[in-house]
Amino acid sequence: MQYINGHIEPNEGRYDSMRYNRAGCSGLKLPEVCLGLWHNFGDAAAMDRMEELIYTAFDNGITHMDAANNYGPSSGSAERNLGRILGRGLRNYRDELVISTKAGYPMWNGPYGDGGSRKYLLASLDQSLERMGLDYVDIFYHHRMDPDTPLEETVGALDSAVKSGKALYVGLSNYDGETMKRASRMLDELHCPFIINQNRYSIFDRTIERNGLKDAANELGKGIITFSPLAQGLLTDRYLHGIPSDSRIARDGRFLNSSAITKERLEQIRELNDVASHRGQTLAEMALAWILKDGSITSVLIGASKPSQILDDIGALKNLSFSDDELRSIDRISLGNDTE
């Protein structure tokens, strides 16, 4: 990305090497690697670094930027900062971007700032659009299941978001397979374009395989975009020799703390790193490739604090093929399964 005469000029070859997959049976295509704004886009982040991350992603075909109302810290700051970056020139390329946001976790005080109620979801979407300076988002997600709100109400709010023109598509995040099926039936009856699920998935976290989400999404023709593919950095070379002083564990223990680095986990990381080395990949590249290996996952969301991390993660797309022996080894190491 360059500034020429006060305007940004993206890389002309930005679409040459990225692959794009349809989100389920919809017409919307998403890049296989997308940029998540969960970390590194909050109040403490420098604007020039955030711009560099966004521009590096876009210059390399990453057209999808994923936010949520509570991303920061503080809550709302990731959306505000994305809005500022859009306002500094990227808004000229709005039609080349897929921008998503979510609501479902606590956002403001009182009984109406959390959950899945119609009041919360539609108010939150309005606030998100204002923070980002947008008329609409491409995908609006309900961020989590809410047992205290009738599913029909949550689904109806998502439908209203589309019919009001404030969202083009809707998605569900952190739903299990059975609840997603129920919601999907309701959304289909409303002719609401529900196209994608967003869930945690990695070599170390197979929840969507156990709770039926992965099978249900493929059965119903809905896409899946996954977050935390590197298990908060565990599936990288960062922790092969302990906990570095500049690591996420050392700097910010909110989502990953030192208790996660057990002797057994370190041994798993080292063994997985050996498998990756034999494949000619870094551990991070293999972890991303493993998620995308069988075509059942639409895209994988990455986080980055440096542009080089984005480029490294895109490198995973060069080799998505795994032998049966490699897959058995990964399962044996990560799950403790004796599949030999």
Image: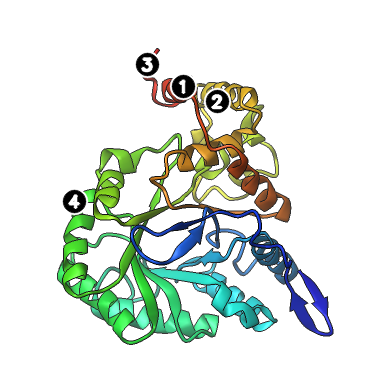
Is residue 183 shown left or right of residue 18?
Answer: left
Q: CA distance from mark 3 to mark 4?
A: 29 Å
| Image quarter in which the N terminus is found | bottom right
Label 3 sits on a secondary structure element that is loop
How far across and down, in percent of the image, does residue 181 sit? 19, 56
Dividing the picture into quadrants, the one containing residue 225 is bottom left
Q: Earlier in the sequence, mark 4 or mark 1?
A: 4
Label 2 sits on a secondary structure element that is helix
Please report contact status of discs 2 and 3: CB closer than 8 Å, yes or no.
Answer: no
How far across and down, in percent of the image, does residue 253 sit? 54, 47
| Tag of residue 339 | 3
Residue at 70% from the left image edge and 40% from the top image edge: 245
Q: Earlier in the sequence, mark 1 or mark 2?
A: 2
| Image quarter in which the C terminus is found | top left
Residue under circle 2?
A: 272
| Number of marks present in the image shown | 4
Residue type pointed to by label 3: Thr
Residue type pointed to by label 2: Leu
* Vertical order, 22 against 125 (above or below): above
Residue under circle 1?
A: 333
Q: How dense is the environment of label 4, judged by Cα within 10 Å: few (below 14), some, or many (20 and up)?
A: few
The outermost residue toward the right is 5
In this view, the residue in front, 121 or 281, is 281
Please report contact status of discs 3 and 1: CB closer than 8 Å, yes or no.
Answer: no
Number of the front mark, 3 or 1: 3
Q: Earlier in the sequence, mark 3 or mark 1?
A: 1
Please report contact status of discs 1 and 2: CB closer than 8 Å, yes or no.
Answer: yes
Residue type pointed to by label 4: Glu
Residue under circle 4?
A: 178
Q: CA distance from mark 2 to mark 3?
A: 15 Å
